[in-house]
Amino acid sequence: MTPTLLSDKRSYLNTANLVLLLTLLMVATHLAQTFEYYLPSGQFKALHLGLALLIIFASAVGQARHTLARAVFALCFCIAALAAGYVLVEYSGLTTERVFGPEPMDVVVGCLLIATCLIAAWQQWGITIPLIGVLGLLYGYFGNQLPTDLLHHGGMSFDRLVSYASIPNFQGVLGSLTELSASTIFVFMVFAGLLKSTGGIDFIMGFATKLAGNSRGGQAKIAVLASAFMGMISGSTVANIASTGSMTIPTMKRSGFKGPFAAAVEAVSSTGGQMTPPVMGLTAFLMVGVTGLAYDTVILAAALPAALYYFYLLLAVHLQATRDGVEQEANNDKRIEVPPARVLLARYGHLLVSIVVLVYLLVSRMPPPYAAAYGCLSIIVLEFISNAIRQRHQPLQAFKEAAARLIDGLREGGFSGATIAVIVAVIGIFVEVLTATGFAQKLSYLMLDYADGHLGILLLIAALACLVFGLGLPTSAAYILVALLTAPALIDMGLSVMAAHMFVLYFAVFSALTPPVAVASLVAARIAEASYFSTSMQAVKIGLPGFFLPFLFVARPELLMLEGSVLERIYVVVISALALTALNVAMVGQGFVRTRWPVRLLLAAAAILTLIPGVTGTLVGCGIIIAILAVQQRMKTQRAAEVLP
C-alpha cells in the first residue's frame, strides 16, 4: 500500500472516530435534555443545530476525495463550531439586550450560521433544499421590487432579514421547527437507528414472510408488509426503500415479476409508510407542532386511511400476480431462509417488546420525547439481556457484541437525526420569510378566489400545488411547505384542521412517486436495474387509487375518526374498501376473471359514485360493484368446472 493510500485511510479513520464521538455526544445531550431539561430552549436549539453541523462536516471531510474539498469542509466545521459557540455564550444578551436589533457581530454570526446550514444541506441532500432556503432569503430582501400583488411586500432590511432567519430573534434556522427537531424528532431517529442495528429489519422481513410468503404474489406482498412495518418507525421514504428494497426487489424479480413492477411496488409501499402511525415519517410530530392537535388525535386519524391504503396495495399485488400468472409455488425462494416463528420471537422478541412499549406510552399520552427516550432505553437494556441469555456461556463476548450493535445504532440514528435537523433548519428560513412577508396568507386568498366557493375545485388546486411543492423533498420538508402554503386555504373553506392537514400531507408524500422527479421510483429503479420512466409510470398506476384517499376523508370525515358513531365508521370503511377494490380491478384489468375495458370503466365510475356523499349514489355505486364482482365470481366457478374432468 502506497504512503498516500495509508495517509487517506488514517484520515478516514480519524474522521470516522470524530463523527462517532460527536454523534454519541449528541445522543447523550438529547437524552439528558429530555429527562432533565438542563438548557433553555434557545440554547438547546443552538446546541442541537451546532452538533448536527459538526457531524455532517466531519463526515464530509472523511468522504471527500480531493484536498480542496477536505479543506473547505474542515473550514465549514470550524465556522459552525464558532457560530454555535457564540450563540451559546451570548444567549442571555441575545434574548434580553438585542431583541429590538442585532449588533454587527450578531449579523456576522447569523450569516455564518445560515451559510453553513445551506452548505450542509447541499452536501447531504443535493441542491433542492438549499435552493429553497436561498429563494426565501432573496424573496425577503428583494420582494419589494416584485410587480404582482401576490409576490410584492414592503421589503426587509438586511439586518432584519438575518434576524428573522437566525439570531437574535431565534427564528428561521433556530425557530420552532428546529425546536421540534431537537426535542422530539432526533430522539425518534435514535430509536429507529437502534431498532435497525439490533436486527429490526431481519425481524420485520421474517415476520412479513411468515404472513404472506406462501400466497400468490407472496414476494410482492412481503415487500408491501415489510415496508409498512418499517415505515411505521422510519423517517424517510428513501431510507425505507434502501433498507427493505435491497432484499425485496430482487426476490420479487426472481418470483416472476418484471423489474419495473417490482421496483414500483417497493416505491409505493415505502411511500405509504410515511403516512402510517405511530411516526408517519416524522410528520406526526410536525403536525402536532404546526396545528396544536394532540398526538393521539393525529395518529388515530391516520390509522384507518393507512389501513385502507395497504389493503388496496395488497389487493393490487394479488390481482397483478393473478393476471401475470405468477404461481404460488414460484414464491418459495430457496435463497431466503426464514426460521420458524418461535425462533424469530426468541431472537428478536425483545424488539417487539420495545415497539409495544413505545406505542403504549404514546397512546397513553406521554409526551413523545419521553416515550421515544424510554423506547431507546428499553432497546438498550433488552438487547444486553437477550444477548446475555443467548450466550450465557460467553458473557464477555455477549456484552461486546451487544455493545457493538448498540453503538452502531446510536451512530446511525444520531447521524440521520443530524441530517434531518439541517433540513428542518433550512426549511425554517423559507417558512419564516413567507410568514413574515405575508406571502402565505396572500396565496391562501388567491386559491380561494380561484375556487370561487367550490370546495371540489379548491381541493384539486391544493392537490396539484402539494404535488409541485413536494417534488424531490423528504417527507418532513414537503409537509412543512404544504402545511404553510395550502392548508390555510382549505381551513378557510370550512375543512377541519385535521382534514386539511391530512389532505395536504398525503399529496406531499405522493409527490415522491410522480414524475418528473419521483425520487422514490428513482431509488427503487436503481435497485431493480429497471427503467426509471417505466418504474415511475407503474408506481403512479399502482398508487392511483391512493390519490383518491385524501378526497375520500374530506367527503367521509368518519375515516379520520372526526365524527360519527362506531357503526357509521364501520359503514364508511366497508364502502371505501369496496370502492378501492373496484378501482383496483379497473386499473389492473383483473378481478375474479380478466376484465375488459367497458367493464373497467363502469367499475371506475361506480367507485367514484360510491365515494360521493349521499345515500342514493353510494347504494347505486355499491350495487354496480357487487353485481359485477358476483358475475365474475360465477364465471370463474363455471370455467373451473369446465376444466375439471
Image (cartoon, helix red, strand yellow):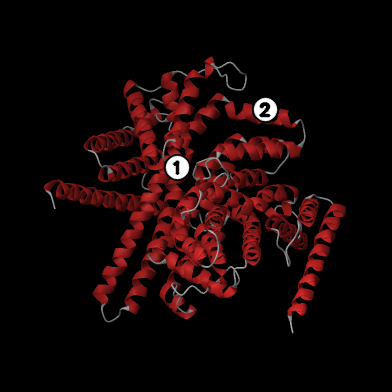
Q: Where is residue 281 drawn, in percent x and y?
A: 51, 51
As drawn, the label of residue 446 is: 2
Residue 487 appears at what percent x and percent y?
63, 38
Element on which disc 1 rests: helix
Q: Residue furthest right?
A: 616
The residue that label 1 is drawn on is 179
- As drawn, is 551 to the left or to the right of 173? right
Q: Is residue 144 visible?
A: yes
90, above or below 518, in the image: above
**Mark 2: which secondary structure?**
helix
Report the number of discs: 2
Q: Residue at x 54, y 28 (%)?
A: 434
Q: Nearer the viewer, residue 300 or 419?
A: 419
Residue count near mark 2 (Cα–Cα under 10 Å), binned few <14, some 14–19, many ≥20: some
Q: Are marks 1 and 2 in contact (CB under 8 Å)?
A: no
Which of the two residues, 584 or 40, is positioned nearer the viewer here? 584
Residue lying at the far bottom in this picture: please name it: 645
Q: Residue 156: percent from the left, percent from the top?
A: 48, 19
Say left or right for 309 vs 576: left
From the top left corner, tell me how far across and down residue 413 is, in percent: 38, 54
Q: Which amino acid lies under the numbered mark 2 shown in the image of this protein? A: Leu
Question: Would residue 214 be visible to someone looking at this image?
Answer: no
Picture residue at 30% right of the left edge, 36% below the top: 80
Q: CA distance from mark 1 to mark 2?
A: 31 Å
Q: Residues within 10 Å of mark 1 (few under 14, many from 20)?
A: many
Which comes before the other along the chain, label 1 or label 2? 1
In this rendering, position of residue 460 left or right of residue 466: right
- Kind of residue sitting beneath label 1: Glu
